Image (cartoon, helix red, strand yellow):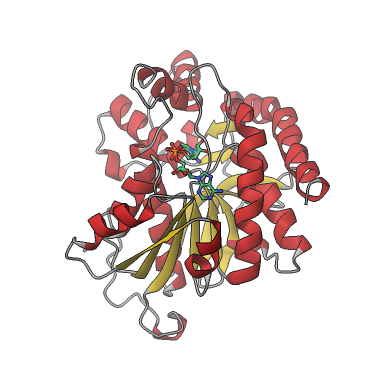
Amino acid sequence: AHFVHDTQGLAGSVHPEATSASGSGKFNVALLGAAGGIGQPLALLLKQSAYIKELRLYDVANTAGVAADLSHIATGARVTAHSGAEALGTALFGADLVVVPAGVPRKPGMTRDDLFNINAGIVRTLVAGVARYCPAAWLAIISNPVNSTVPIAAEVLKAAGVYDPARLFGVTTLDVVRARAFVAEATGAAPEAVTVPVIGGHAGVTILPLLSAAVPQPRLSEAEAKALMARIQDAGTEVVKAKACLAGAGSATLSMAYAAAEFATSCLRAKAGERGVVECAYVASNLTSSPFFASPVELGPGGIARIPPLPRLSPLEQAGFAAMQEELASSINKGLEFAPSTM
Ligand code: NAI
C-alpha cells in the first residue's frame, strides 16, 4: 500500500526491464540525518514504502534506537542503523537513492542563508561519501540553503568525476505541498486534487508559485494572488515562529517529511519504470539563464528524462521571476565558490 495518493495506479505500469539490480523493483534507500526532526518522521513514512528493500538510517549518533523502533513495524522494508562517520560507507554502499536532511535547521530570526556555513560543510562531506560509495545513486538534498547546497553537491561530484546532473535534486516539494494546501483552502477543492507548479529556488522570493497555472484555477484578484504568493514564500517562517516556544525550536519537520516521502516515492516509481512521473525539483537546468532552477521535471529510469518548458507566466509572476534572479545567482555562486575552495 502507498502512503501517498496514487492517482495513476501501479498495476501494469511497472516495466520489468527497468527494475533494480535484484530485478525486484525494490531499492536501497539511504537517509543521511535520519535521527533528526525531519529524518525520523521521514524514516517512518519510508518504512511503509513498497518500493524499498532496505532503508539505511545514517546520522552522527542515535540511529540504533530509531532503527529498532521502526523495525517493529510489520512492513517489508528492512531498516538498518549506521551511526558515526566511520559508518557512512556501509550506509551508502549499494544505495540507489540517497536522501539528505542532515544539518542544522533555522531558528527564529535566522534566514536559510544563515545556515550556510554549517550545512555547506556537512553536505560537502556527505556528498563526497556518495561519490565514493554509491556514485550511480540518485541524490536528493533537503539540507538548507538548498539554493547553495545543490551547487555544492554538483561541484563535489564533478571533482570526483561522477557528476550526472540527471540524478541530482534539491527537494522543493514542500513548497509545492504548501501551495497545494493553501490553494485548496482558497478554492474549497480537495488538496489531493490540486496541482501548483512552483519554480525558481527554495528561499524567500526565489520561491515562485505559478498560481496562474494551478489546477483547479483559484479565482483571485491581483492583491489576493500577491498575498497568497507571499504566504507560500514565507510559509517556513510561519512554522519557525510557531515552534519558537518549543524546547527544541526549529523549522518544518512533519510537513517536510511528508513532502520528502512524496518526492522519494516518485523517484523510486520512475526508477522502477513507471512513465510520466513529474515532480518539481531544483536541478541543473537550461530553462532559464540560471544554471540551477526549480521547475516541474519528468523523471525516468535514469533520472531526469525531460524538463518541460515553463507555462506562460502572469504579469505578477513575470515580476516575481525578474525579482528572484539576483538572489538566486548569488546563492548559487556562494555554493560554487565554497565547494572547491575548502576541499
Ligand atoms: P535537526 O537538527 O532536527 O536534524 C538534523 C540531523 O542531522 C540531526 O540528527 C543531526 O545529528 C544530523 N547531522 C548533523 N550533521 C550530520 C552529519 N555530518 N552527518 C549526518 N547527520 C548529521 O534538523 P531538521 O529540522 O531535521 O532539519 C534538517 C535540515 O533540513 C536543515 O538544514 C533544514 O534547514 C532543512 N530543511 C529543508 C527543507 C526543505 O524544504 N528543503 C524544509 C525544512 C528543513
Residue 143 picture quarter = top right
Task: Report x, y in % for residue 90.
Answer: 49, 69
Q: Residue at x 41, y 72 (%)?
A: 27
- Look at the image and tell me whether residue 256 can be seen: yes
Determine the residue located farthest toward the right in the rendered image: 341
Q: Residue at x 43, y 28 (%)?
A: 250
Relative height, residue 275 to residue 246 (above, below): below
Task: Report x, y in % for residue 211.
Answer: 47, 32
Q: Report the quarter where the N terminus lies.
A: bottom left
Relative height, residue 2 to residue 25 (above, below): above
Task: Report x, y in % for residue 218.
Answer: 37, 29
Determine the residue located farthest toward the top in the rendered image: 223
Q: How many numbered discs, if any?
A: 0
Task: Report x, y in % for residue 135.
Answer: 62, 70
Residue 102 or 282: which is nearer the viewer? 102
Relative height, residue 144 to residue 30 (above, below): above
Q: Is residue 181 left or right of residue 129?
A: left
- Look at the image and tell me whether residue 135 can be seen: no
Residue 3 or 94: which is nearer the viewer? 94
Residue 195 picture quarter = top left
Q: Is residue 1 left or right of residue 27?
A: left
Residue 224 picture quarter = top left
